[in-house]
C-alpha cells in the first residue's frame, strides 16, 4: 500500500484534496493532507513570520508522523501542487531515504536558490507580490484571490462552478515570505524519482517539454533522466477539483513507476526540428549578413521577399541556430524557387521575457531586407511560426503599406497560461482589430496541442468580429512542426497552398 502526502498550493489548504482523497482511499491507498501554517481555510491574517522554511517543517513533521504510523519502510509519495512543490522538495531533501517518489502537480521542479515566486507564470500576479513586499515589507500577506482573479494563478478550466465558489470562500491569504524565501537544497533530493503531471489547459504538455529537451535547454535536460516520468491531463491548473478520479488514477500509476519518459539528446531518434523538410526544393544560393540569410531567385530585377520568423523560446546556445533548421531553409528555398527572395533570420527569443528584444531583431532584419537592391521594398510578406506567432502583433496592429501579406503556421496567437511573463504588447488576438485589409494566411494543424489550438480559435473569432481578411489552410492530420514530422501528401499540399497564397499577395 502506498502512502500519499498531499501538499496544497498558494492560498489553499486540505479542503482542495477532499474528492481526490476519497478516490485514492477507495483504492486502498493511505492518504494524508498537509496543513501548512497560516493557510487552510481562514481569511484572517496569517502569522507574520511564516516562510518557506516553516512549511518545510510542516511537511517534515507529517512525514515523520506517517513513518511512525506505518513503518519507516513503507513507501511515501509526496505530491506538491503549485507552490506546494517547494516545501515538498525541501522536506524530501532532508528525508530522501523515506520518500519513494515526488509528484509535481502542474508545476515545475523547484531549483536550489530560487524562490517560489519565480514559478508564478502570470506577470500581474508576480508584480502584486513584489509591490506588496516593497510597500509594506515581506512580513505581510497577499490577499486571497477574488472569484474572478484565480485565472492569474493558473487556468480554472474544468472547475465546476460550485467548486470554484468553495475554493474562493475557503482561500487564505498567502504569507509573502513563503513566495520570496529561496529554496535551499543539499542535493539529496536528486536521488528521489520524480513524476510530473502536466495540465494541458494550463499551457503545458509532454510534447512541449520534449521539444525543450531536443533544443538542449539546460533547465529541461535533467527531465530526460530515466528517474523522471510524465503524465498529462486535459484540464486546467486545479485537476483535484476538475478531474479528481482521473488524477487519482494518474497518481496510483505514478506510484507504480509508470509514465512517459522523455527521449534524451543524442538518442537514435532525430529531434523534430532537425528532420528533413517535406518537399524537395532546389539548392539555390544564399547570402549571409549578420543574423539574416537571403535565398536568391534566378529572376532578374527587384523581387518580392518573404521573411520567415522562427518560433521559440530557443536557448541561446542551440546549434545549429534556427535559420539553419531544415524547415526554415526549406521554406526560404521554396520561396526563392518561385521567384521571391526567401529570408531567414535568428532572433533573440531565448526566454518568455525576450519578446520585445526578438521583435526589435525582426524589425531590423526587415529593414535590412527592404534596403537590398535585389528586393522590391514595397512587396514584403512576413511568415511567423509557432511561438514566433506572438511577434505578429506589432505588424497586425499597424500594418505598413509595404506589407502585402502576413502568414503564420501552427502559431501561438495569445500568450498561453503557464508559459511565464509575456509583455502584453504581444497579443495578436487584440492587434488584429487594426489589420484592416491586410491578407492573413493561417496554417492550422488538426493534431495541435489543446493550449495552442485554443489561441488560434480565439484569434479567428476576433478576426471575424472585426472583419479581418483571414484565410485558413487546414492540415487535419498534421502536428505542430508538421513540415518535418508528417511528410504526407496532405501536408505537402498544405505547404503548397499556403505558399501560393502568400506569393499571390506579394506578387499582385
Image: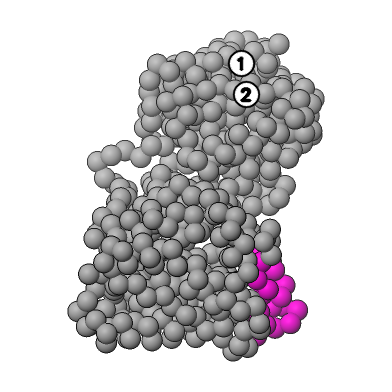
Left or right side of 388 for 30: left
State whether residue 110 is above or below residue 37: above
Residue 55 in the figure: left or right of residue 74: right
Inspect this view and state whether residue 390 appears. yes
In the image, residue 431 sits, relative to residue 200, either above or below, namely above
Give the magenta-colored segment's residue range: 125-145
Q: Residue at x 53, y 28 (%)?
A: 444
Horizontal and vertical percent position of residue 249: 33, 56
**Mark 1: few/some/many CA within 10 Å (<14, 14-19, 20+):** some
Q: Which residue is mark 1?
A: 501
Looking at this rendering, what residue extends furthest in the left direction? 73
Position of residue 70 measured from the top left corner of the image (x, y, whole percent): 24, 81
Secondary element type, mark 1: helix
Judge whether residue 261 is colored magenta: no
Q: Position of residue 124 (x, y in %)?
A: 68, 61
CB within 8 Å, label 2 to label 1: yes
Q: Quadrant of the N terminus?
A: bottom left
Disc 2 crowd, CA 10 A, few/some/many (<14, 14-19, 20+): many
Q: Secondary structure at mark 2?
A: strand
In space, the residues marked 2 and 1 are separated at their CA atoms by 7 Å
Residue drawn at 31 percent across, 64 percent down: 26
Name which of mark 2 and mark 1 comes first in the sequence: 2
From this viewpoint, is residue 291 visible?
Answer: no
> Which residue, given by chain and number where applicable, does mark 2 sit on?
441
Say left or right for 466 vs 428: right
Q: Residue at x 37, y 75 (%)?
A: 32
How is colour applied across the structure in the image? one colour
Q: Residue at x 53, y 64 (%)?
A: 119
Amino acid at each position: 500500500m502506498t502512502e500519499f502526502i498531499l501538499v496544497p498550493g498558494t492560498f489553499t489548504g486540505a479542503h482542495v484534496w477532499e474528492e481526490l482523497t476519497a478516490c485514492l482511499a477507495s483504492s486502498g491507498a493511505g492518504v494524508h493532507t498537509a496543513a501548512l501554517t497560516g493557510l487552510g481555510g481562514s481569511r484572517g491574517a496569517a502569522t507574520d513570520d511564516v516562510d518557506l522554511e516553516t512549511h518545510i517543517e510542516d511537511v517534515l513533521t507529517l512525514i515523520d508522523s506517517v513513518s511512525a504510523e506505518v513503518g519507516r519502510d513503507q513507501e511515501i509519495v509526496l505530491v506538491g501542487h503549485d507552490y506546494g512543490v517547494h516545501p515538498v522538495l525541501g522536506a524530501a531533501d532532508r528525508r530522501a531515504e523515506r520518500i519513494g517518489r515526488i509528484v509535481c502537480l502542474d508545476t515545475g521542479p523547484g531549483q536550489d536558490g530560487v524562490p517560489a515566486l519565480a514559478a508564478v507564470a502570470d506577470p500581474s500576479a508576480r508584480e502584486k507580490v513584489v509591490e506588496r513586499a516593497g510597500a509594506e515589507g515581506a512580513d505581510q500577506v497577499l490577499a486571497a484571490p477574488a472569484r474572478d482573479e484565480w485565472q492569474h494563478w493558473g487556468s480554472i478550466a474544468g472547475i465546476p462552478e460550485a467548486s470554484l465558489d468553495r475554493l474562493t470562500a475557503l482561500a487564505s491569504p498567502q504569507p509573502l515570505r513563503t513566495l520570496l524565501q529561496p529554496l535551499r537544497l543539499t542535493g539529496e533530493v536528486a536521488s528521489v524519482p520524480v513524476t510530473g503531471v502536466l495540465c494541458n489547459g494550463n499551457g503545458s504538455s509532454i510534447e512541449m517539454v520534449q521539444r525543450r529537451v531536443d533544443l538542449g535547454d539546460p533547465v529541461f535536460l535533467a527531465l530526460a533522466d530515466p528517474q523522471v516520468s510524465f503524465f498529462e491531463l486535459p484540464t486546467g491548473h486545479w485537476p483535484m477539483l476538475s478531474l479528481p478520479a482521473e488524477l487519482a488514477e494518474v497518481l496510483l500509476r505514478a506510484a507504480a513507476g509508470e509514465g512517459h519518459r522523455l527521449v534524451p539528446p543524442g538518442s537514435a531518434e532525430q529531434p523534430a526540428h532537425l528532420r528533413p523538410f517535406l518537399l524537395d526544393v532546389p539548392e539555390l544560393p544564399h547570402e549571409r549578413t549578420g543574423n539574416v540569410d537571403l535565398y536568391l531567385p534566378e529572376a532578374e530585377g527587384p523581387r518580392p521577399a518573404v521573411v520567415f520568423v522562427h518560433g521559440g523560446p530557443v536557448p541561446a546556445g542551440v546549434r545549429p541556430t534556427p535559420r539553419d533548421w531544415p524547415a526554415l531553409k526549406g521554406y526560404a528555398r521554396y520561396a526563392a524557387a518561385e521567384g521571391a527572395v526567401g529570408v531567414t533570420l535568428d532572433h533573440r527569443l531565448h526566454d518568455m521575457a525576450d519578446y520585445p528584444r526578438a521583435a526589435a531583431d525582426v524589425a531590423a532584419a526587415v529593414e535590412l531586407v527592404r534596403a537590398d537592391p535585389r528586393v522590391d521594398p514595397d512587396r514584403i510578406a512576413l511568415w511567423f511560426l509557432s511561438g514566433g506567432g506572438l511577434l505578429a502583433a506589432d505588424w497586425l496592429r499597424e500594418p505598413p503599406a509595404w506589407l502585402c501579406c502576413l502568414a503564420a503556421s501552427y502559431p501561438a496567437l495569445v500568450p498561453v497560461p503557464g508559459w511565464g511573463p509575456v509583455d502584453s504588447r504581444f497579443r495578436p488576438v487584440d492587434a488584429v482589430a487594426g489589420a484592416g485589409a491586410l491578407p492573413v494566411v493561417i496554417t492550422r494543424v488538426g493534431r495541435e496541442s489543446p493550449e495552442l489550438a485554443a489561441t488560434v480559435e480565439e484569434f479567428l473569432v476576433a478576426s471575424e468580429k472585426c472583419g479581418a481578411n483571414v484565410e485558413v489552410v487546414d492540415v487535419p492530420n498534421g502536428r505542430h512542426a508538421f513540415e518535418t514530422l508528417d511528410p504526407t501528401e496532405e501536408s505537402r499540399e498544405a505547404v503548397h497552398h499556403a505558399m501560393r497564397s502568400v506569393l499571390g499577395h506579394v506578387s499582385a
